[in-house]
Image (cartoon, rainbow, N blue to C red):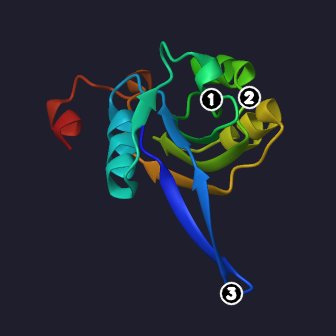
Amino acid sequence: MDWGFMLFASSGLSVLVVTLVMICYFSATGNSKRVAERIAEAIGETAVSIEGLDPSELKGKKLSLVSPVYFWTAPIIVQEFLRKIEPSELGFLVVTYGTTTGHFKHDAEGILGLRFSACYDIQMPDTWTTEYDLSDSAFVEE
């Protein structure tokens, strides 16, 4: 985990504010993991899977989250994780989705009792294959 540094100038006095940001992700197919890792690399942070993560590691830290949307909301594993953590504040939320972002942001903020400072969505190939006829190889290739 890297330290994120921000420098503010106030009344001619420079103050160094140190904020530890954790970019947590859940990814069943690898899409959200890839997004989290690309963001972490770009901003000099580390992406950490919520699977097996001790919730106490987030106490007092700024949480940013990357996750897919399942059935218009956060996957159950993400909801359970959010109920166990106590971040000091929320950074950004990035949701990956196939057809809709649903109510993910609203539901996650409701569980946490905090608001994300920024929210983004990235449309991915829809991986919920029960919705499609996969017997047509030309359609699958497309």
Q: Residue furthest front?
A: 13
Q: Is residue 86 above or below residue 120?
A: above
Q: Amino acid at mark 2?
A: Glu
Find disc 1 in the rendering and name its residue. Answer: 58
Task: Left or right? Give the position of 65 relative to 112.
Answer: left
- Which of discs 3 and 2 lies nearer the camera? The answer is 3
Q: Amino acid at mark 3?
A: Gly
Tell me residue 7's x, y (percent): 56, 70
Q: Residue at x 23, y 22 (%)?
A: 135
Q: Residue at x 63, y 73 (%)?
A: 8
Q: Residue at x 34, y 56 (%)?
A: 42
From where the camera sits, is residue 99 visible? no
Find disc 2 in the rendering and name its residue. Answer: 86
Tell me residue 16's x, y (percent): 59, 64
Circle nearer the N terminus (3, 2): 3
Q: Secondary structure beneath disc 3?
A: loop
Tell me the quadrant of the picture where the N terminus can be found. top left
Mark 2 and mark 1: Cα distance apart in space: 6 Å
From where the camera sits, is residue 17 visible? yes
Find disc 3 in the rendering and name its residue. Answer: 12
